[in-house]
Image (tube, rainbow, N blue to C red):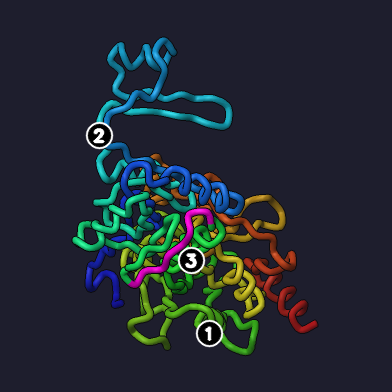
Amino acid sequence: MGNHKRDGKFDKPRLGVYHPYEFFFCGYSNSGKTTLTSRVVEKLSRDYDIGCVKHCSHSFDFDREGKDSWKYSKAGAQEVLLNAPGRWAGYFQHELDKFEKKFKFTQVDFVLAEGAKEESGDKILLLDEKGLSLELLKNNEISDVKAIVGAEKPENTYDLPWFHRDDIDAVSAFVLENIKSKIPPLKGLLLTGGKSSRMGKDKAWLTYHGKAQIEHMYEQLSEVCSEVYISCRQVEDYPGFPEERYLTDAYQNLGPLNGILSAMSIDAQSAWLVSAIDLPYVDSTVLADLVSKRNPFKIATAYRSHFKDFPEPLFTIYEPQARHQIFKYLGIGHNCPRKILINSPVQLLDQGERYWLDNANTPEEFEEICKKMKK
């Protein structure tokens, strides 16, 4: 990964048919796909927000004749939305393209889909009574099959794991393990803020731990991230680090999102632990707590502010799916990362100590924190 302005790279995220985390249940009619999928959903939905898709090989009517939504549809409406407190439902009289399908599931942790043998994605193959679906494997007519489920174990499992269709615990664990295997690696991003008018100097060069704060934070993040990058306007302002570790802003006039989006643009398949440079209490304990409680199925994992029940956006793990959410809010005129997190599916954590994310904005506050840290 090099300097963003030099190579102009704009990385693409890992997508999927409906969601970055998805799993398919496939087989012929009457093989028990709906029953198995429903039971796995019932098991996993105790801990996760799940989206479901059912593929149909024939047309269907979504609403009952005579209902108001049916009347709108028959009158010519192409899309109908039913809105009630706490929920909504809709249907469309046109084919959703592959991009629209992904937009529909941005609020869930992962998607379980029934059917669609032809789709590219990890699958469980359900065996019918006659075992005809095994012909799909034999003839290479289905791809990405990770396991077989049925009432009786076939003689040939094609070197795939086999589960009894009533062993829901085992099937659910297998599906969840498969989904978790796609959790992306974690990289670090240090946000420099330049010269602080109230502090009178760049807070990156303040000394809390016997060395410049930027050096301390770089070392701390390197313990939990595979790579750490320094987000800045000019490389010359922060000398002393390997050339490839600088990430200059590719965006302007977006505040902290300048650096966050710049990082996501060159590596959209990793998660980013984003940290402001001026957090003197962030150490191995704080970082270990955040990383251990990371929820990769939400768009971000963040701590609550100790003075408001809001997420702190500048010490947060942003997952790859956060990029879509950020651009969505930019499209309607909002560039505040806190507001984006407040209105998005986020894993919100309590700080272990009230002072964990405290910082200093004036020389007096700097001296006060130094005194506290000495104690």
Q: Which residue is mark 1?
A: 219
Q: Which residue is mark 2?
A: 95
| 90 in relation to 374, above or below | above
Q: Hey, what amino acid is under mark 2?
A: Glu
The magenta region covers 159-166
Q: Earlier in the sequence, mark 2 or mark 3?
A: 2
**Residue shown at the point (43%, 13%) measured from the top left:** 68
Q: Hey, what amino acid is under mark 1?
A: Glu
Q: Which residue is mark 3?
A: 177
In-front residue for pair 152/64:
152
Q: Is residue 338 left or right of residue 367?
A: left
Q: Which mark is residue 207?
A: none
User: Which of the two marks, 1 or 3, is nearer to us in this view?
Assistant: 3
Instruction: Check the picture and name the quadrant holding the C terminus.
Output: bottom right
* Labelled pair 1, 3 in contact (Cβ < 8 Å): no
Q: Earlier in the sequence, mark 1 or mark 2?
A: 2
